[in-house]
Structures are given as C-alpha cells and as structure tokens.
Amino acid sequence: MSPEGRQAVPTPETMNTAPHFILYVRDQERARAFYEAALGVAPRLHTPGMTEFALPGGAVLGLMPEAGIRRLLPTLPDPSLGRGAPRAETYLRVASPSDGLARALEAGATELSPVRPRDWGDDVGYCLDPDGHVLAFAAPTPTPAVGPAVDLRPLDPEHDVARIAAWLEEPDARRWWGDPVTALTEIVDHDPGTVAVVVWEGRPVGVLCWQVPTREELEDAGLADLPRDLVDVDVLIGETDARGRGIAPEALRQLCARLREQGVRLVGMGAAEANAPALVAYARAGFVPYRDFEEDGEGYRYFTRELAEDA
C-alpha cells in the first residue's frame, strides 16, 4: 500500500487523553441548560445522546441520557432507579467558589452547604444539580497574610524608661500624649502587670498600658454608661520606622487575647479625631466606634471591643 493510502495510527502523543466524567441525566436538554449556566461556558459538544463541557485543567464533563446508557449497557441496573441517592460528586476547582455556587443556585440547583473553609485546605460550596448529582465548587483556602513579628514583654525600668522618655519627646507623641514628663510618670507608675513594651523583630518600638478608668474619668468624657469593669488601653509606637506597618493592631490583638484569658469582657480606647493613623489602627485591631466626645477643645472618638465575642 502506498504511503498515501495508509491511515494514521494514533500514538500516545497524539491521542486526546483528557479524562472524561459522564453523568447520567433524565433530560439531556435540561441538564445542558443547567450546566451551561452553572459553569458559565457553552458546551463544546451537544448532540443527541451526549453533551460535553470542557473543564478547567483539561478534563471533560459529559451528560448522557439515562435511556442512552440503558441501550448501551442493557445489563446495567436502570440509573433512573437510583435517583435521590448520590454516590459521587463533580468537584470543580474555580477562581471563585462563591460565584460558581451562586450561578448554580440561580440555574436551579439545591444548596447543600455554603462555601466555607474545609479541613483539607479548600474553600468549598456544595449543591445538587437537577438530576440529584452532587456538584462542588472549590478553590484553595487563602493563606492568611503573615503579620509583623510582634511580641509583648514586661517593662524593664533599667533599659526602657530612657527610651520611652525619648519617644514622648517627639512632636507627634507630644501632641497626643501631652507633657512628656507627666506622660512618662503615668506609664512608669503603672502596676507592672498593666504595662508592656512592644517588640518588633527583636527591637523595642513602643509601649502599651492599660487600666480601669474611674467613674469621674468616664463621666467627664460622657461615657458613664460604660460598665465599671471596662479596661481602657493606651498605645504608643515610638520608633518612626515602625509606624504604618501593622504593629499597633497586632500588639492590640495580642493584648486583647491576654485580657480575655483574664476574664476581661470589654476593652476601650480613645483617639483624637485628627489622629487618623490611630483611628485606622484601632479599627484594624477589631475595635468599633462607641461615641464621640470632646476634651480640652479637642474632638475624640472612643472605641470598644467585646472580648466575649472573640471566644
């Protein structure tokens, strides 16, 4: 036989080896319409007896009428008798599981489980297609952003007081903390268990202190309705190169975790309305605005955080 008359024989390199997954469906046209809407793509093949959709990664999803498989494999138990008892699922990795599940539900699917992190590392939402097949939309659970390397340690008077004094002399600290000598005295006079140095990557960069305010202090600020066991917190990030790096929010989160373990229910913080970085930091640490007040002609905003809700 001449070379022109020979028929090419498929080789492993030329064969289409993409895996095909075929679902047996009651109504091919209805199933086609559902999957076209749920997947957001048109079928690559749609002929009587078979519909195919190209899936991400190269696999193919096929839809075959139940009557067709009965003719093809007459000894197989009738698939229509097994409706309502799913024994497999179509697990689709997509860019947005929430969008995928929403499309499927809008197309007529029945939700089984909303999208949420699963213990195998994916965010997955589950539904049933119109034929009762389980359909899952999945994506890897995002890795939490790694926060700054922050630690809280006790105040060391021998080494920390001079450093804090220098921080309080800075213009920004003077504006919000007032007279440096008075502010330093208040910090140093704190009970050792209610003050901590903020350490970033092994270097002291700030200080935290906390206390239960007196009734008079709360009344003066128009906050007398807050509970008597409220713990009020002050934070100072003194090193300028440590500001704006998420260090204050992380330090506050760690402090709140400690206070919660000690049984504290409510934590509060005040910031001048003009101190935009502080307002942002407190919000990032989970504090929510409680009330605005005025002190010495300056507008302030008080924030609170319910620690019981963190448990």
Image (cartoon, helix red, strand yellow):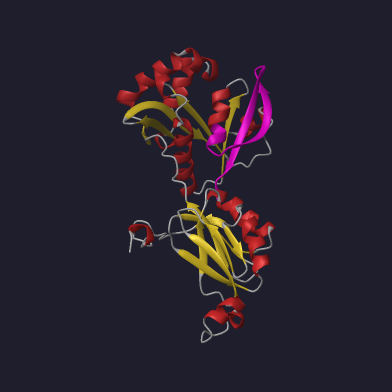
Q: Would residue 239 be visible to someone looking at this image?
A: no
Q: Position of residue 31 (x, y in %)?
A: 64, 66
User: Residue at 61% across / 34% down in the picture?
Assistant: 303
> Foreground: 266 or 248?
248
Splitting the image into 4 quarters, where does residue 194 fall? Answer: top left
Q: Considering the image in quadrants, where does the N terminus appear?
A: bottom left
For the stretch drawn in magenta, the main secondary structure is strand
71 to 246, vertically: above or below: below
Residue 225 position, x and y percent, is 69, 39
Single out the residue that lies furthest toward the front. Answer: 2
Give the x, y percent position of residue 244: 47, 25
Given residues 39 and 84, the one toward you in this image is: 39
Rendered location of residue 293, percent (x, y): 68, 26
In magenta, the rendered stretch is 282-308
Q: Looking at the image, is 174 positioned above or below residue 20?
A: above
Instruction: Find out whether residue 23 is within the magenta segment.
Output: no
Apparent side of residue 188 relative to residue 306 in the rendered image (left or right): left
Residue 162's image quarter?
Answer: top left
State yes or no: residue 291 in magenta. Answer: yes
Q: Residue furthest bottom?
A: 75
Quadrant for residue 268, please give it. Answer: top right
Q: 300 or 45: nearer the eye?
A: 45
* Residue in front for this viewpoint, 41 or 48: 48
